[in-house]
Image (cartoon, grey):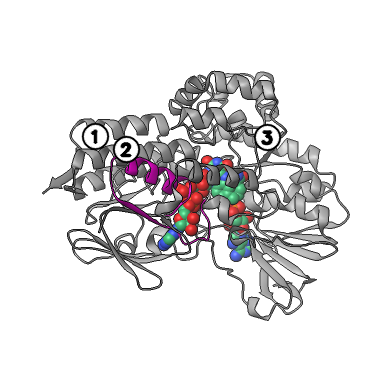
Amino acid sequence: MYDAIIVGAGLSGLYALHRLRGLGLRVKVFEAGEGVGGTWHWNRYPGARCDVESVDYSYSFSPELEQEWDWTEKYPGQPEILAYLEHVADRFDLRRDILLGTRVVAARFDGGWHVTTETGERVGARYLVMATGCLSVPKPVEVDGLANFRGEWHHTGRWPHEGVDFTGRRVGVVGTGSSGIQSIPVIAEQAGHLTVFQRTPNFSLPAYNGPLAPETRRAVKAAYGLRRSLARQTHSGIPAEPAVQSALEVGHEERLARYQAGWERGSLVGILGAYTDLLIDRAANDTAAEFVRSKIRERVEDPADAESLSPRDHPFGTKRPCLDSGYFETFNRDDVTLVDVREDPIAEITAKGLRTAGGSEYELDTLVFATGFDAMTGALTAVDIRGAHGRSLRETWEAGPRTYLGLAAAGFPNLFTVTGPGSPSVLSNMVVSIEQHVDWIADCLAFLEGRTIEATAAAQEAWTAHVREVGAATLYPAADSWYMGANVPGKPRVFMPYAGGVALYRRLCDEVAAKGYEGFAITG
Ligand code: FAD
Ligand code: NAP
C-alpha cells in the first residue's frame, strides 16, 4: 500500500514524484511508455520542438538545476528536451520509483484507491494523482482503408524511436496543426515528393529559432528568479509586459508597427499579447489575423496556394497558433503539393495511397498522420476510474468534463488531476501550470495528513459554470478546435480549459487553500 500513486512520468509526473517524496510519502509512478519524458518521449517526429522558449519551458523548482542546465537553442528540439527530462530523473534520483512500460487501465476507490495495470497487477494507495497529460492520446486514424495501405504509416504522436527514412519517397502528410507545421518543412527536405493534405489552414508565425548565445544564457541565469515570478504574474505563463490598450484604440500604422515588432520576436505572445482585446473582440482580432494573412501572402509565391493556406474560418489565436521554421516557404518548392481536403475530402486510403471524394488518386510510399489528440480528457477517460459510488469518470463526463479548479472531481475522493480540464493548462506555458498544480497538490496532501478529501458538488458546479462563463466571454468558442473537443467525432462541444489566465487562477487556488480547502469536504 502506497501513500500515493502517480500515473504518468512526463513533466507533471516527474515533478509530482519529487514533491510528494519530499513530504516523506511512499510513492509509485506508473508510466505506459518505455521511458520518462511524456510528450517528449512520444513525439519524435522530425522538426518537433517547443513553442515556448527553452529558458521558460523548464522547471523552476530547483535553482541548482536552473543554473547547471544549458539550453543550446531558443526553441530546442525534442531530443534536447527529452535529454533535460532524463537528466531531471537522474539528478533527483526519480527512476527507482517509476515503473515504465506499465499502463494503468482501471482505478477504483473504496476508502483508498486500487489501481489495476494492463498486466492485471493491483496496487493500492491512499491518493491517486493523474499526471496523464492533456495531449497524450493520439486520435485514431479516421479515414477508411488504412489496413489496405501497402506503404508505411506513422502518427506524429507515436513516432518510432529509430526514425523514418523519407529519402526519395512519395510522402503524404495529413494535418496542418503544430505537429504538421513543424514536420512538413523537414520532411520536404528529404522526401522525393511531399503532398500535404490540409483540411483547415492554421495561423503560424516564424519562430526565428537559433542558438542561445552564452551571454544570453548568463543574463537569464543571473535574473532567473525575477523572470520566473514575472511569468507567474502573466496570463499565459510566458514572461512579457502586459498589454494596456485595445487594438482599436490606436491607428492603423501604429498597429502595424506593433504587429511587425511582435512578428519579429518569434514568440506566441509577440502579436497576441500586443493588445488587451485580441482574444475577446472580433474586430480587434481581425486586425491581427489580417496582418498574419498578409505575411502568408508574402511568404508563399503562388497566390492560389497563399489563399488556401490563409485561415479565415477562425479568429487568430482561438486554435493554438504555431511557431514555424520555413513552413509557408515549403510550398514554394516544386516537389511539394498542397491538397485542400476541405474542398475535396479524403474518401479512403487505398493499397497505393489516398483517394479523395472527387476521385483524385495520390500514390504514396509513406503516410504521416499529424492529426492530433483526444485532448484534455482523453487520457483520463481512457482509464476506468470509478469513484465512491462506483460511477465512472467517463460516464460522469459524458456531457463534458466537470471539475473543481481542474484539480478534483466530486464523487472521486483523493483523486487529483494535474492540468485537468477547468485549469489554464493548455492555454499556458505548461511548465508554469504543472508546477503550480503539483505544488498545490503537495501542500494539500501535507495539510491532509492522510485524511480524505473530496470536492463538493456545489463547488464543482460553481467552478464549471465559472469556466464556461469566462470561456464564453472570449472568442475561443468560435473555433472548431481541440480546446472545444471539436476535433474528435462525437465528443461533446465544451470549451475545456480555463481562460482566466495563470495569475488569476493561482490566486484563486491559493485562496481556496488558505480558507482550509474551501469547496472540499475533508473527513477522517
Ligand atoms: P505528458 O507529457 O503527456 O505525460 C503524460 C504521461 O502519462 C505520458 O508519458 C503517458 O504515456 C502517460 N500515461 C497516460 N495515460 C497513462 C496510463 N493510463 N497509464 C500509464 N501511463 C499513462 N506545451 C507548452 O507549454 N509548450 C510547448 O512548447 C509544448 N510543445 C508541445 C509539443 C508537442 C508535440 C505536444 C504533443 C505537446 C506540447 N506541449 C507544449 C504540451 C505538453 O504536452 C506539455 O507541455 C507537457 O509536456 C505535458 O506534460 P505532462 O507530464 O502533463 O503530460
Ligand atoms: P491538431 O492541432 O489537432 O492538428 C491536427 C490537424 O490534423 C489539423 O489540421 C486537423 O484539421 C487535421 N485533421 C485531424 N483529423 C483529420 C481528418 N480526419 N482528416 C483530415 N485532417 C484531419 O494536432 P497537433 O498538430 O498534433 O497539435 C496538437 C497540440 O499539441 C497543439 O495545438 C499544441 O498545443 C501541441 N503541440 C505543440 C507543438 C509545438 O510547437 N511545440 C508541436 C506539436 C503539438 P482540422 O483543423 O480541420 O481539424
Camera-nearest residue between 137 and 21: 21
Q: Residues within 10 Å of mark 2 (few under 14, many from 20)?
A: some
Left or right, 392 with reference to 153:
left
Magenta region, residue range: 8-36
The structure residue drawn at horizontal position 56% and vertical position 54%, both measured from the top left corner, is 41
User: Which image quarter holds the N terminus?
Assistant: bottom left
In the rendered image, which residue does mark 1 sit on? 513
Question: Element at badge 3?
Answer: loop
Amino acid beneath label 1: Ala
The structure residue drawn at horizontal position 46% and vertical position 27%, both measured from the top left corner, is 234
Camera-nearest residue between 242 and 96: 96
Question: Element at badge 1?
Answer: helix
In the rendered image, which residue does mark 2 sit on? 440
Amino acid beneath label 3: Glu
Q: Earlier in the sequence, mark 3 or mark 1?
A: 3
The CB of the residue at mark 1 lies under 8 Å from ligand 1? no
Residue 16 lies in what quarter of the image? Answer: top left
Q: Position of residue 443 (x, y in %)?
A: 28, 37
Left or right, 429 with reference to 465:
right
The answer, for residue 523, to whether it is visible in the render is yes
Left or right, 88 with reference to 255:
left
Q: Position of residue 99 (x, y in %)?
A: 43, 59
Contact check, label 2 and label 1, Cβ < 8 Å: yes
* As drawn, 313 above or below 340: above
- Which-is-in-front pick, marks 3 and 1? 3
In the rendered image, which residue does mark 3 sit on? 73
The answer, for residue 134, to whether it is visible in the render is no
How many numbered dots are placed on residues in this image? Answer: 3
The structure residue drawn at horizontal position 48% and vertical position 20%, both measured from the top left corner, is 226
Give how far apart the Cα atoms at labels 3 and 1 are.
Answer: 38 Å
